[in-house]
Amino acid sequence: MASLKKRLAMRLVNLYPPFLGAGIRVTYPKDDPFAIVVRMKLTFYNRNLFGTHFGGSLYAMADPFFVFILTKHLGPGYLVWDKKATVEFLKPGRGRVTGRYRVPPVEIARVKALADAGETVEPVYVAEITSDAGEVVARVTKTLWVRMKAV
């Protein structure tokens, strides 16, 4: 069970100014501790000139969440950083959009085992941002960088 301090910090991410300004809302499913769900409504503050979601806001929805999941489950003895990201904008985003980010326990165990063996691990994760109608608006591919902290 995560400490109260860690749980509070994860909830406070909703007050992070770029998320707050873009209307990004982060939730943590109670039934899946390996997932994070991020939603964003279309508002004046995240709308582009064409009346659809601004691409930077769509990327912001995906930016830190795979890192958050790995950091939480690997623990304090590991460094976890973003290394690379690509975004494919597939359809104009209108209305509310949702990103679901999940790293399965078996994948976390694989990354941990490799890092414990002294390797630098660069896992690649893909997430889709979808409309409420189920259409894929954007696909984000993230490459992370993971290793044990130096003693």
Image (tube, grey):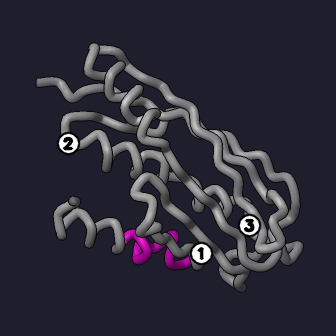
Percent of width and height locating residue 44 = 71, 85
- Could you tell me which secondary element the residue under label 2 belongs to? loop
- Could you tell me which secondary element the residue under label 3 belongs to? loop
- Could you tell me which secondary element the residue under label 1 belongs to? helix
Residue 76 is labelled as 2
Residue designated by label 1: 22
Query: Is residue 60 part of the magenta span, yes or no?
Result: no
Q: Which residues are magenta?
A: 13-22
Q: Quadrant of residue 114?
A: top left
Q: Is residue 66 above or below residue 116?
A: below
Q: Is residue 67 above or below residue 49?
A: above
123 relative to 59 in the view: left or right: left
Residue designated by label 3: 54
- Marks 1/3 in contact by CB < 8 Å: the verdict is yes
Q: Residues within 10 Å of mark 1 (few under 14, many from 20)?
A: many
The CA distance from mark 1 to mark 3 is: 9 Å
- At x 65%, y 40%, the residue is 141
Q: Quadrant of residue 3?
A: bottom left
- Is tag 1's residue or tag 2's residue first in the polypeptide sequence? 1
Q: Quadrant of residue 74?
A: top left
